[in-house]
Image (spheres, grey):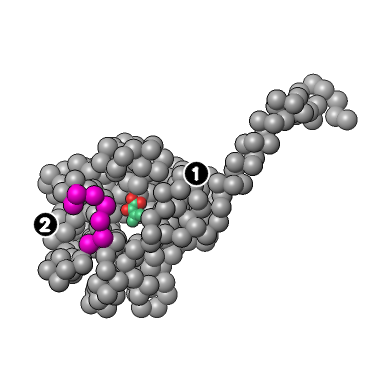
């Protein structure tokens, strides 16, 4: 029996059934230690391409590769047994054609064992969503503020502030629903728009800087644990100060190595304890 068939993960249909019933709790994870800590607590883990900025300190999300995303997703899937795991399609891995998207999505799922993919894009990418879904790949769409469009947007700016822009984002979300997406991440939009999209769609919306009315919420884990080097977006909140605890541990280790208090005999081989 394979490792995957022994796990009891929350499935995509189970998340879809939460619409209007129970909030979906989602966070990002890129590594085994963080995935371990959220197993049994969150409903969905996103191995987001924010990996580029958070784990590799890149300027934006554009430079992370399919192989890097697949490796991070594999670490998360191996470790967290219960949440549904989605992996982001990185920039340049799906925009060229639906066929290119399928090839890269299938590869990432084969390498990692993740349950589906997320892709950023408006209505023009709905045909790609349909192509993937018809071939067995669950798709979580991502509309509104789309970090992979940072260069065309001229920065990471909230979207949907004008009637015209709000209308377009509404159409983007509806087009992905029509194409078979199981859910939509709505990022960085006016609260009223996040609420309206949630009311109009039959599939779950997962908000990040969108609206409390969304069917679920997602944040970057490092942002809520004060591990992002102080650059926390307005829509996030520090729920615990892991940075202080980790800094204390590192300092205590350094102090004891310098003073000769560590290692003790208990940490050595071939030495009688006490
Ligand atoms: O890359 C990412 O982490 C994301 C979200 C936080 C939604 O897309």
Residue to which mark 1 is pinned: 32
Q: Is residue 194 above or below residue 59?
A: below
Residue, x 53% and y 50% (percent of image)?
Answer: 36
Q: Is residue 66 visible?
A: no
Please tell me whether mark 1 sits on a helix, a strand or a loop: helix
Q: Position of residue 125 (x, y in %)?
A: 15, 55
Left or right, 159 with reference to 113:
left
Q: Is residue 236 visible?
A: yes
Q: Is residue 19 above or below residue 93?
A: below
Q: Position of residue 76 (x, y in %)?
A: 44, 46
Residue range (magenta) = 153-159
The dot on residue 197 is: none
Q: Position of residue 247 (x, y in %)?
A: 60, 41
The secondary structure that dominates the magenta segment is loop
Residue, x 34% and y 38% (percent of image)?
Answer: 58
Residue, x 72% and y 30% (percent of image)?
Answer: 256
Residue to which mark 2 is pinned: 124
**Residue 234, quarter of picture:** bottom left
In reply to whether residue 174 is colored magenta, the answer given is no
C-alpha span from label 2 to label 1: 35 Å
- Quadrant the C terminus occupies: top right
């Amino acid at each position: 029996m394979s490792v995957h068939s022994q796990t009891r993960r929350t499935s995509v249909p189970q998340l879809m059934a939460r619409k209007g019933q129970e909030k979906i709790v989602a966070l990002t994870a890129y590594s085994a230690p963080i995935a371990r800590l959220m197993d049994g607590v969150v409903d969905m883990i996103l191995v987001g391409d924010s990996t580029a900025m958070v784990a590799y300190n890149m300027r934006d999300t554009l430079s992370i590769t399919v192989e890097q995303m697949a490796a991070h997703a594999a670490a998360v899937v191996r470790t967290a047994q219960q949440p549904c795991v989605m992996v982001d399609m990185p920039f340049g891995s799906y925009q060229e054609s639906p066929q290119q998207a399928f090839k890269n999505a299938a590869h990432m799922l084969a390498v990692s064992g993740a349950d589906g993919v997320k892709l950023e894009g408006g209505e023009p990418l709905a045909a790609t969503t349909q192509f993937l879904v018809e071939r067995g790949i669950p798709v979580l769409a991502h509309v509104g503020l789309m970090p992979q469009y940072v260069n065309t947007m001229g920065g990471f700016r909230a979207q949907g502030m004008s009637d015209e822009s709000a209308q377009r984002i509404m159409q983007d979300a509806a087009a992905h629903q029509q194409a078979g997406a199981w859910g939509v991440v709505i990022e960085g939009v006016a609260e009223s728009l996040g609420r309206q999209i949630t009311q109009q769609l039959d599939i779950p919306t997962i908000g990040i800087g969108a609206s409390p009315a969304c069917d679920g919420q997602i944040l970057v884990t490092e942002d809520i644990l004060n591990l992002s080097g102080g650059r926390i977006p307005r829509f996030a909140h520090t729920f615990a100060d892991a940075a202080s605890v980790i800094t204390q541990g590192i300092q205590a280790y350094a102090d004891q190595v310098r003073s000769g208090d560590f290692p003790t005999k208990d940490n050595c081989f071939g030495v009688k304890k006490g």
